[in-house]
Structures are given as structure tokens and as C-alpha cells.
Image (cartoon, helix red, strand yellow):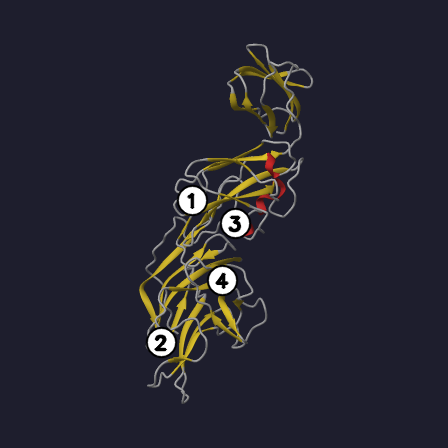
Amino acid sequence: MKKHYEDKIKLFTALAGSLSIFSVNTAEAQTIVVRDINPDTMVDAANPIYDLDIDNDGSVDFEISRISSTNNYGTTFFYFKGTGHIGYYMPSAGTSNTHTFVSQNGSDWYVAKLNVGDTTTFTSEYNDNLYTRLFDVSGTDGGTPTLTDDYQWTAGTTDKYVGVQFTIGNQVHFGWVQLSVAADYSTITVEKVAYESSPRALMKAGATVSANAAASVTIDDHGNNADASDIRVTIAKAANEANITTYRAYVVPIAQINSATLDVLQTTAVGNYQDIAKTGSNIITNLSATLKDIYGNDIVEGTAYKVIIESVGDSSTGDALSIPSNTVTLSTMSVITGITSPNTMTGKIYSSGSTVYLTNIEKNCKASIISVTGIEIYNGSINAGDSNIILSGETSGVYIVRLTAADGTSAIQKVMLQN
């Protein structure tokens, strides 16, 4: 068997072929690897077999083949099969990790024809049959070539896609193969292949690049409703939003943050994420009161959360994740606004982790933070409006924050520091 490998490779990524490892300190490297088959390769009577190595690791993943029958019907068959199969007939489940996205017509399975933006991911429609057909055509013995069944790959089909599933190491990846069909059904032309380097992440047919991730995400406890509306999200917009359709917010319990990979978030149920429209600027917004965490649980006080923002790409752009936000544990501690008088200062004082947040503070004032044992750990000045005081290195526990303005008005609040 003559093997055809794509020696001329055009990469649309700086991390071609690399596995993506999610880290709580870095955005997930959601990188699409695209390989241009240059020149385009035809599967025809002269070259009836094409061995396709999706990730160019030297191991053939799929075979595209043309077989002509010798019966009186003059039928030609085009197949797209995974090379991990053993034997002609349907193997037992799990015997192969190479699969083709298919569509079913009665008891027959045919290779599905995907358009730009159609997704390829885990689905029951990934067939495990050794010989899943692109199409059969009769009349190749001198008659008029005619499809023998209701195949999707019809004469003159140009630049459409086959969805594929294969493995790199022990990780499943998804991708697409771009094909065209000759007007007389004599050839299949293989033009381009691509795959998603993030394991198990969905792949959009035709996608060649990933969206830019949000530059940063921060959250704070900005209410006392004991639900997701207490979480205020600040999104520093992506450097380029041109291919982003929306931002999508996911609330993740800190205990499960390492499990919140791209594929998990992409399959999160509606109601367990919130779409946030891009504005062209940085965004500050409170989440919806009805929003659940990614597992469908209520967002409650006393649980530590992070928020991850997904940049959802358009039909030809892959999705990407932000770096997870800081950690916030919702609390019902209310602001104690000092002396009871018409001149009492207004604002809100609360904490998350080792940071004290001061929001909507009415006046410039002196700030003092004291432990419950009476030791002052901070003394300084703050301006009216919003500001933060970071107290890393202090012992976790309850502290008292006191603000005093020049006119004698004040605000006092107990906070919990967690280092």
C-alpha cells in the first residue's frame, strides 16, 4: 500500500500538535491545528487509497478509498474508514478510537456532510463501522453516474467537511477533513485537515483559529441576596473581539476548578452558565439571580467560587477560556455605618480571601484595620469611591475595618480574611 503523507504543512498555530493542559493560573490553550494538503490530493482510479494522518505523527488515522466492482452494474464505492478497526464487520464497542461523524438512513450509515460551523464532538452519531461510505455510484461502466442511495456527498460538492474523532496518546480529539466531489463522481479531493488540540473539546467544521480569551476576570461579593446576583464580574475584554459572538460566564466551586476544562464547560446545561454581550469595552456586571454553578447547584453563601469566562467564537472560530478569576466566598455580613446620625458615611465594606473591598465609599477618609485582639495591621488613607486593600500574610480570621472622614463621620465593618 502506498502511503500519502502531508509533507508540506501550513500551521495556523504556535503550538502545533501540543496537548492542552488546564491550569488555574493560565488560560486553557485552545489551539486549532490546521494542515493544508498541498497540493490537493485526489482519490481516483489511478490513486485508489489515501492514508490520512490527522496529527502528522506518522500513524495513519483514516483511509479514504475508491473501490470499483466487477459486476454488471458498474458500481464504484468511496469509503472513509478509521484504521483502528479489525475485520470487515462492525467491531465490538471500544475497539477503535478513530471514528467518522455519520448520518443514518434506515439501517445504513453514511458519512455526514458538514457545513462551516457544524460541531464535531462526542455523539452517538460517531459510527464504529469499518466501512462507512461517502457514497456508492452506479453507471461507472459507461452509463450515467448515479447515486445508489440517499447519500449526502453528491456530485459537485465543494469544500465540505467530514467530522472525525481520533486519539493523541490516550486523549480523544475532534477535527474535520475538507473534501470535494467531482461532478462525475470519479474523484474525491482531499484539501485540508484540522483538529482541536484541547482534548475532548468540540470542533467547528471549517474553524481554523480560536477566539481571543478575555484578558482578565475578577469577581467580588457585591450584594446580600444569597444567590448568584451577589457576584459582580469585571471582564477585561479580549484584545480582539472581532470573531467573538458573546462572552459566557461559568461559576465554578473552587474545589472543582481543575475539572472545569473547555470540553466540560462547552457541554454545560443551559441555566448553568450566563451569556454576557460584548460591548467593545471592559464589562462590569452582576450575575443573574437564577444562575446555577456548572453542576446545576444553587450558588450559596459559605462556598468558595471562581468564575471562568468563555469567549464563544463565531461559526468559523473556536472557543477559548479565560484565566479563572480570584476566589470569592459569599457572605451576609452587612455594613455597619458607624454612629447613628444624619452624617453617617455610606458605602460597602466586605472581603474575599486576603483582600478587603471598599465600594461606593462616600468620602475620602482614613482607614484602619484591627484584629479582634486589638492589633492594628493596616493604617492608611483611601479616596471616595472604590478601592481594595490587600492583606496577604495575615492570619486568617475576623478583623474590624474602620473608616473615618475628616468631618468625623465613619463606617465600621467586621470582615473575614482567608489567607
Q: Quadrant of residue 352?
A: top right
Above/below status of 182 relative to 405: below
Going 37% across and 58% down the picture, which residue do you hit?
35
Q: Which mark is residue 262?
A: 3
Mark 3 or mark 2: name the one nearer the start of the chain. 2
Count neighbours of disc 1 (C-alpha within 10 A) and say few if under 14, some if 14 to 19, many if 20 or more: many
Residue 36 appears in the figure: yes
N-terminal of the pair, mark 4 or mark 1, is: 4
Q: Secondary structure at mark 1?
A: loop
> How far is mark 3 from mark 4, CA to CA?
17 Å
| Farthest left residue in view | 39
In this rendering, position of residue 7 left or right of residue 279: left
Q: CA distance from mark 2 to mark 1?
A: 41 Å
Q: Residue at x 42, y 62 (%)?
A: 115
Q: Amino acid at mark 4?
A: Gln
The residue identified by callout 2 is 185
Kindly give the residue lying farthest to the top in the view shown: 407
Rendered residue at 43%/61% (across/down): 176
Residue 387 image point, x, y percent: 52, 24
